[in-house]
Image (cartoon, rainbow, N blue to C red):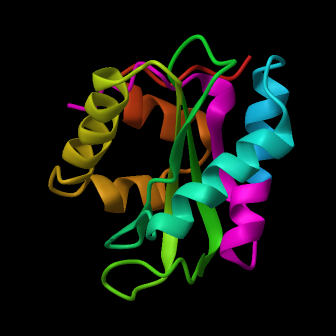
Amino acid sequence: MPVLEFLSPDSVIPGLRARAKKQILLELAAQAARQLPSLDEREVFETLLQRERLGSTGIGDGVAIPHGKLARLDRLFGMVARLEKPTDFEALDGQPVDVVFLLLAPENAGADHLKALAQVARILREPGLLERIRTARDASALYALLTNRPTPQAA
């Protein structure tokens, strides 16, 4: 079962509105900077954009895992967004992306960064998980699905 420890309830976006790859990266950078005050939104965006220039982080099956390392980050940080509309991400299989996992790591994270990327990729291969991600009713259900924690009850 999934257990993505680097996700928090605030880092789940069940309906991100974006029409282009750069817009997705910009919105994710803004959200990350709001949650991590030590980070600058522009620096996060430039780091993600620089990584995309090396090759698309669209891994196929409608999924992208944009990632990067930042000097002023002291821990792994993850975010997941389900796009309202599938968007071209120049993915390896040519298919549009509708699920995006953002992963940011400290500059000196080394193997931890790679392990987190591998963990996300491994979890996404679980039979039926992508469909459950795509149909989760809201942020709390999506968070529970990806962290193997119970869905918080509405107050």
Camera-nearest residue between 33 and 138: 33
Placement of 34 over or under 84, stated as above or below: above
Check residue 20 for magenta coloring: yes
Of the 4 image quadrants, the one containing the N terminus is top left
Of the 4 image quadrants, the one containing the C terminus is top right
Placement of 25 over or under 126, stated as above or below: below
- Residue placed at 79% from the left, 26% from the top? 39
Camera-nearest residue between 132 and 20: 20
Residue 102 in view (yes/no): no
Q: Is residue 58 left or right of residue 89?
A: left
Image coordinates of residue 112 in percent, x first then y, are 33, 22
Task: Tell me which corner region of the image, top left, top right, bottom left or bottom right, holds residue 11.
Answer: top right
Task: Tell me which corner region of the image, top left, top right, bottom left or bottom right, holds residue 106.
Answer: top right
Image coordinates of residue 51 in percent, x first then y, are 53, 56
- Residue placed at 59% from the left, 11% from the top? 74
Give the number of marks.
0
Residue 38 in view (yes/no): yes
Check residue 126 for magenta coloring: no
Image coordinates of residue 147 in percent, x first then y, are 39, 26
Q: Residue furthest bottom?
A: 94
Task: Tell me which corner region of the image, top left, top right, bottom left or bottom right, holds residue 57.
Answer: bottom left
- Residue placed at 42% from the left, 53% from the top? 133
- Residue placed at 50% from the left, 41% from the top? 142
Placement of 65 over or under 72, stated as above or below: below
Q: Is residue 16 left or right of residue 104?
A: right
Image coordinates of residue 107 in percent, x first then y, are 53, 24
Which contiguous range is marked in magenta?
Answer: 1-26
